Amino acid sequence: MITISAKLKDRALEPVLARYAQLFARLERLLFVALYVKTESVAAAKRRFVAEHEITARQFNGVHNQLQARVEAWRAARERNVATTRSQIEKCALALTKLKRPLAQHHKQRRLALLTARLRRLETELAAKIPAICFGSRALFREQFNLQANGHASHAAWLEQWRAKRAAGFFVLGSSDETCGNQSCQYRDGQLHLRLPGALGGGTVAIPVVFAYRQADLLAALIPKVQRVQRGPRKGAEVERCDAVSYRFLRRDDRWYVYASFATATAPVLTDPRNGGVGVDLNPWGLAVTRIDRSGNIADHFEVPWQIEDRDQAQVQAAIGDAVRVVARYALAHGVPVAIERLDFAEAKKQGRGAAGNRMLSAFAYAAFARIMQGRCARDGIGLLPVNPAFTSVIGRGKFADGYGLSVHRAAAAVIARRALNFGEKLRTRSAGTARVLPARNRTRHVWHNWRLWAKARQPRRRLSTQPKGSRGLQPLTGRSLGFDPHSPNGSPCRADCATPNPGALTRGATPQASREHCSRGA
């Protein structure tokens, strides 16, 4: 399923679209009252709405589909807020048991009381039969109580903006049983023919529109093809029909846009894992890409940086899309699949990691990256191999960073590619030098257990300074005072007198190198 968009250039049609949006926004609110306040059945409401408001059954289905999506989104948001608040309460209660000062305990108890009250309110809203939905957004609704601070000249000006916000779009549901995939809006000869309900005079309105992106896919979806009926009395029969195409009209910045959503056929896979693979390590600053050959050896590596901080959603999507296109073209040129990590930051966002950590998680647009990468690979016929992200950076730092002169991110991309192609990740502790030889009783454990011990042993140890507070002894040394090597292979500052890595160590079978010890604060 893809969605393409276009701007409507004929402004003479905007009054018609505005009246259409006002009517269907009002119908959506009336349907909300009928289904959730008066508890009327959907079938009874459909019969009544079709007769009273002079709309078709398909138009009613579009209104009901949009209302149902709005309610489901509200419920999912409330459930996520409840889970987040519960996690915050547990974290706050644990921190309260460790505090000793009365003032700190007081502030933490106030915080705990606020979180408890918020949890009760959210659970009450979630358990209520009537969803607490505000058509037009709560933020704009509250602006009427402070007009001057929110830039409204009068309450009438706010009311006009409020009504425009509530009627800022409408949805036209498609169906494969109809001509051109939609009964109420059909695309023919470069125009959208929008069917008006009887309340607006009936008839159709021709809207000129040109989809600058993937219009050929839309035309392909409108070509009738043989399909098998999945439900109904004709289930199992083969009929000739086109794909369903749904349209959504939205008004943004006083201009109307149309979005067409339809399903596309997946392109045949043109890549072969026997040629190797491309691993992609996602970071807040961009992508680290490493290609391996059929034997698992690193063949090439590079980075694709982007800038997503201080940008809106559209700019972030464009930046990620450009980076994904570079990786997809590179993988297609070498005929190899793409391997990415299966990441989930939902729990991390619930717990909170401070200002810097939360900023990093906010900029870590993994969901958008995964969605764009999946769509691009399906479109270009590139195999996509998601893998478990456990210990990719640790294994990359231990096995490839020093030996190949790579950064940790490029080394992690190599581990991702090797894991997707089922190459080994065994830790040879005899060559590591940082851990003892494993006893016989522990050799049946998973290899990640050994890597966890190795990573724990590699953590830098800082010396405790005996200098008074605020002295030079508690400040990190920089520049020539510490002798940093600015060209460290893994991107982290190292002492210039550290032992250099042995380039031929990996070829002899030794995995992590103990000869290169990274330093911390001159240790």
Image (spheres, rainbow, N blue to C red):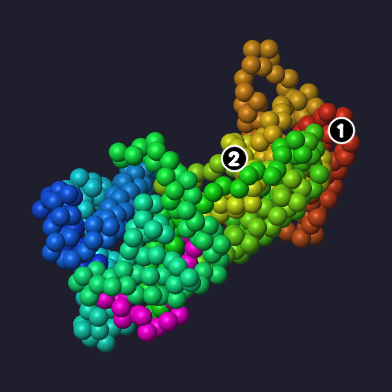
Distance, label 1 to label 2, CA atoms, is 28 Å
Q: Nearer the viewer, residue 36 or 477?
A: 36
Q: Residue at x 69, y 44 (%)?
A: 270
Q: Where is residue 276 in the image (x, y as percent from the top left)?
A: 75, 39
The residue singled out by tag 1 in the image is 507
Kind of residue indicated by mark 2: Pro
Q: Where is residue 290 in the image (x, y as percent from the top left)?
A: 73, 47
Q: Which mark is residue 443?
A: none
Q: Where is residue 483 in the image (x, y as percent from the top left)?
A: 80, 55
In the image, 375: left or right of 236?
right
Residue farthest along the left direction in this orientation: 38
Q: Residue at x 26, y 87 (%)?
A: 153
* Residue 199 found in image quarter: bottom left
Which region is colored magenta? 1-20
In the image, 342: left or right of 328?
left
Residue 477 in magenta?
no
Q: In this orientation, does residue 266 appear?
A: yes
In the image, 399: left or right of 239?
right
User: Does label 1 or label 2 sit earlier along the sequence?
Assistant: 2
Q: Which of 77 and 111 is in front in this view?
A: 77
Say if 516 sits above or below 36 in the image: above
Q: Position of residue 443 (x, y in %)?
A: 67, 17
Classify mark 2: helix, strand or loop.
strand
The residue singled out by tag 2 in the image is 386
Classify mark 1: helix, strand or loop.
helix
Q: In this orientation, does residue 100 appear?
A: no
Kind of residue indicated by mark 1: Thr
Say if 378 sits above or below 219 in the image: above
Q: Residue at x 80, y 55 (%)?
A: 487
